[in-house]
Image (tube, rainbow, N blue to C red):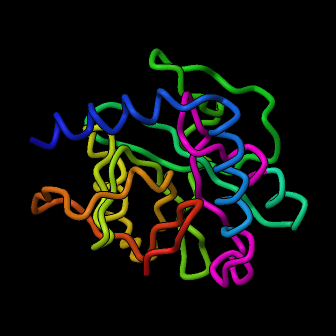
Amino acid sequence: MKNEMRKAYLEKRNAMTKAQQLEKSQIIFQKLINSNEYKNADWIFTYINIGSEVKTIQFIEKAWSDKKHVAVPIAKTNRLMYFVEITNFDGMNRTKIGVMEPNISLDKQVFPNEKTMFIVPGSIFDEDKNRCGYGGGYYDTYTEENQVNNAIGVCYDFQVAKKIPTEKFDRKLRKIITEKRIIE
């Protein structure tokens, strides 16, 4: 059931025009930078968008201009993911699935703290702040192992379902931000 839902929601997201994606992403971006989480954050842990995901490049650039540290993930096998600080987009590598990752070694890994804004992508979310990612379990594993309890999901409003199936390892978000609403 979860895989079918994921596929259907991703097909709908992928059907959006680039202009629609950019317009909605810009609204989400403004909500993020106006949030208390952003204002109080020293560190921003976020993803570099690919495909039809909510766009994050402008958000990352704004964080840099506001003198915030930005960390992005590098995914390895077996649900292993770590975050490293980036100060520009130079030296990025494109993975097999198209994700842009910095060419930075594991020894430069950084960890979230209580003043970290932690942004996560996903395929489907629900009104109870549950998230369904892309099936790899990377964010659930990372947020569990690093005790991240303040993750914020960003998505287009149609990606929020009334209820999605959850499993014991799925982690709730603190809030979800769409172009139309904030679910807290």
Residue 83 highlighted magenta (yes or no): no
**On the rendered structure, is 27 left or right of 183?**
right
Position of residue 26 in the picture relative to residue 50 (left or right)? right
Residue 43 is one of the magenta-drawn residues: yes
Q: Residue furthest top?
A: 96
Residue pictured at 46% horizontal, 49% vertical: 121
- Could you tell me if residue 63 is visible in this image? yes
Residue 58: where, in percent of width, then height? 78, 48
Q: Which range of residues does the magenta coloring cover?
A: 33-60
Q: Is residue 4 above or below residue 182?
A: above
Residue 65 shown left or right of residue 168 in the figure: right
Look at 19% across and 57% down and name the residue there.
164
Q: Quadrant of residue 16?
A: top right
Seen in the picture, residue 24 relative to 45 is either above or below; the reply is above
Residue in view at x 54 percent, y 76 percent:
113
Residue 143 in the image: x percent, y percent?
Answer: 36, 63
Q: Is residue 53 above or below residue 51?
A: below
